[in-house]
Amino acid sequence: MSDKKTRFIVVAGSIMSGLGKGIVTASISKLLSTRGYKVIPIKFDGYLNVDCGTMNPFRHGEVFVLDDGTEVDMDFGTYERFLNFSIDGSSSITGGKLFQKIIEKERKGDYLGRDVQFVPHLTNEIKNWVRDVGAKNSADVVIIEVGGTVGDLENGYFLEAMRQLQFEEENVLFVQLTYLPSLFEGEQKTKPTQQATRLLQSLGIQPHIILAREQESLSDEARKKISLYCNVREEAVFDDPLLKTIYELPLILEKQNFYDMISDKLALDKKRAAELAEWKTLVEKITSPKNEKLEIAIVGKYTSVKDAYISVKEALVHSAAAIDYGLEITWIEASNLEKLSNIGEALGKFDGILVPGGFGERGIEGKISAIRYARENKVPYLGLCLGLQLMVVEYARHICKLQDANSTEFNKKTTYPVIDILPEQRAITKLGGTMRLGSWECDIKSKTIASKAYNGAHCFERHRHRYEVNPEFMDQLSKSGLTFSGVYPSKHGDIVEIAEWPANFGFGVATQAHIELKSRLEAPAPLAVEFMKAAVAYRKIREPKLEITKR
């Protein structure tokens, strides 16, 4: 037994992935935290990578970065956006981390000559990790999301650890998220749920609550069948319907008395009321904004996989809600812009243009063309990470007349390497966990967009990059009107954090940081809010677009 009476909630999937376990985990956490409980989420991912820092966004989606620099699954972004506080890397458990720990202990002789096995050594490591996270954070509730689907080889040992945890701790609750397909309108099929639950039961785990995703609202007949065949009380079968925004789910679960079911099992105070009024108001600003929709273009290179930019999208949702405007995002593949003779045809209708981060040469010239279009037409522009670097490249080429200007990431022989690798990155050979990562301080110049946004001379934002604005070109760029409104004073000299166009080009700001990673519904990214305000102003005075051909 643990010293502190910590409760544990385990969220598992079924036989289908992509149902939104992260959103469910975050929503349950929200219901508890608004009642005054200290809640800490944990995510287990079965892959053998130590973290997801080296994974391709096309395969895994966005890499989320925490304040301490840990590169984690994008579900951590969902947790932080719902809970409105920062999580540390100990909440991220991967198969790679676990096996690395086990092997290191074995090599040191920590197992005293024993043959090292999945049970008990690996499962004990997992249980200890989960308990330690709860104890370190003085958590009332630890909520654990088990990645993958039931029956996966890569998460079977973790589910076994959770089965053992249930018999070692007083209060452990299992929530199963499942999917009910409808072959015909109104006819919900429960067999997949039944099979998934039997598979979970075969592992020694009986879910206490089943949450059902479906196209239509959960029918009484489907609820009764799930209850009967899955050995779960009817009132413990809950509806997870289609929603206008993910932020509605805590409100939907609250209406269904989800907390009451949790409190019964975990011996929590049933009389505690949820403080969700402010959350509801913010959600209504997303679902029913007072003002018209702002049309924003995101020009990226992973646009076929929207999860690659999930935090960027959510940051725009937060900032639009902050000013009570609707939002319509259009995803534009940067490489497609390179094929157009007149990119005004693709970008002419938007109130703002955003270029997010990314790696590799593909689509770079398309992004630069989009940035040039925004500058020459005074369309509000926001650049993130690579979006700052390419803003500098574009400015160097077309304002400073350094025609060959580029980043050494894309052209190592460029005559004008206005973007170059960070000095501390030059000797690094390993890719995993070696970039400039996590939260870094930024000193902000007064009387700039940045100082207005952050209402002060300092800010802290998260980073994930290897390249920077080359200090050798800062003076020339500044004399041509580009303002470096935010810098980090390193031992190698100032690292550019924020850059701004001169006012005659309209609103144009870019940041080396990934400001989207700290944006939350209750605390939107300050620069994103200023970008949205600029989009409103531009929409009101929009002039006919100048037709810019690619040159």
Image (cartoon, helix red, strand yellow):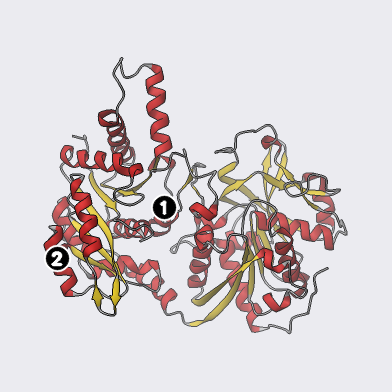
Res 244 visible = yes
Of the pair 499 and 150, the residue shown nearer to us: 150
Dot 1 surroundings within 10 Å: few (below 14), some, or many (20 or more)?
few
Q: Position of residue 285 (x, y in %)?
A: 43, 75
Report whether 505 appears left or right of 216.
right
* Residue matched to label 1: 85
Query: What element does badge 1 sit on?
Result: loop
Mark pair 2, 1: CA separation: 32 Å
Res 35 visible = no
Q: Position of residue 218 (x, y in %)?
A: 23, 72
> What is the quadrant of residue 349 in the picture?
bottom right
Of the pair 26 and 268, the residue shown nearer to us: 26
Nearer-N-terminus badge (2/1):
1
Amino acid type at circle 1 is Phe
Quadrant the C terminus occupies:
bottom right
Report whether 313 appears left or right of 227.
right
Residue at (56% x, 77% y) in the render: 294
- The mark closer to the camera, 2 or 1, is 2
When the figure is inspected, residue 214 is found, relative to residue 231, above or below; the finding is below
Residue at (42% x, 51% y) in the render: 76
Residue at (67% x, 64% y) in the render: 334
Query: What element does badge 2 sit on?
Result: helix
Residue at (38% x, 73% y) in the render: 281
* Residue matched to label 2: 235
Amino acid type at circle 2 is Glu
Of the pair 348 and 472, the residue shown nearer to us: 348
> What is the quadrant of residue 156 in the picture?
top left
Q: Position of residue 45 (x, y in %)?
A: 39, 45
When the figure is inspected, residue 432 is found, relative to residue 283, above or below; the finding is above
Quadrant the N terminus occupies:
top left
